Image (cartoon, rainbow, N blue to C red):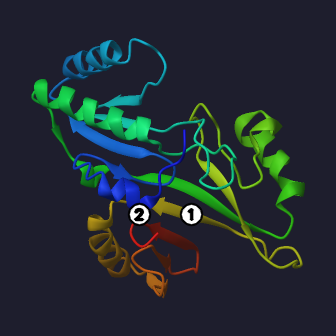
Amino acid sequence: MDMLSWQAIRDAELANWRKLGQGLHARFLIGSFADGARFVSALGEACASGEHAPEVRLGKGFADVRLRSDDAVKLGTGEGYPNVTQRDVDLARRISSIAQSLGLTADPSAVAEVELGLDTADEAAIGPFWAAVLAGDPGVYDRLDVCDPTGRVVTLWFQGTDAHETPRQRFHLDLWLPAEVVPARIEAALAAGGTVVADDKAPSFTVLADPEGNKVCLCTYLDR
């Protein structure tokens, strides 16, 4: 299925969900692990066909759900790339309905997703190495990034740069957040000794640095 554009996802108006790096994310609040188990069981019945199913993580007081189509196709390219399709939007609505029927409320401001960015002038040379190290399979390197299909480790993507002498290449964190929580997160970071390195692309992303200059990008779905 075709990957949905950022605008199409916004137009879907999924109140309980937020689009982060490569998927739709939701957090539903649960009173106990048993409540979470009942929720997961209901999702299992709704997805009995096995054609498309959510990723679910139960924790103390919450059930996190991620939706992503591994067979999504980039618009205009015909290339496969894990992301959100109409199938995910439709399933998100069904899951929200199931949660409501079980008396669960959503906390969309609580979702987050971390990715690693690595500057490189030759991603083809280093991509298979990082795929082997992070996922145990050089084959999960797909030109743009290393994405573990089982979700065990964070996605690593490669940021193109001019050739340079070692050790100029650097890692940085991309922290995907709901847009509504970013201003408070920036305020907290500044109060803790951080600085704003660049905000000319905000609200799409804002670059912060800790007191030693280590950088993190706070990313949102806006203006993309």
Q: Is residue 181 above or below residue 164?
A: above
Q: Quadrant of residue 194?
A: bottom left
Q: CA distance from mark 2 to mark 1?
A: 17 Å
- Mark 2: which amino acid? Tyr
Q: x, y (%) of residue 43?
A: 31, 20
Sort mark 2 into few (<14), some (14-19) or many (20+) by Cα contacts within 10 Å.
Answer: many
Q: Is residue 15 left or right of residue 43?
A: left
Q: Quadrant of the N terminus?
A: top right
Q: Judging from the image, what secondary structure is the residue with disc 1 in?
A: strand
Residue at mark 1 = 173
Q: Quadrant of residue 38?
A: top left
Q: Is residue 74 above or below residue 55?
A: below
Q: Judging from the image, what secondary structure is the residue with disc 2 in?
A: loop
Mark number displayed over residue 221: 2
Q: Which of 130 and 210 lies nearest the eye of the viewer?
A: 130
Whether residue 55 can be seen here? yes
Q: Is residue 73 left or right of residue 56?
A: right
Q: Which of 152 and 160 lies nearest the eye of the viewer?
A: 160
Mark number displayed over residue 131: none
Q: x, y (%) of residue 127?
A: 81, 51
Q: Is residue 29 left or right of residue 218?
A: left
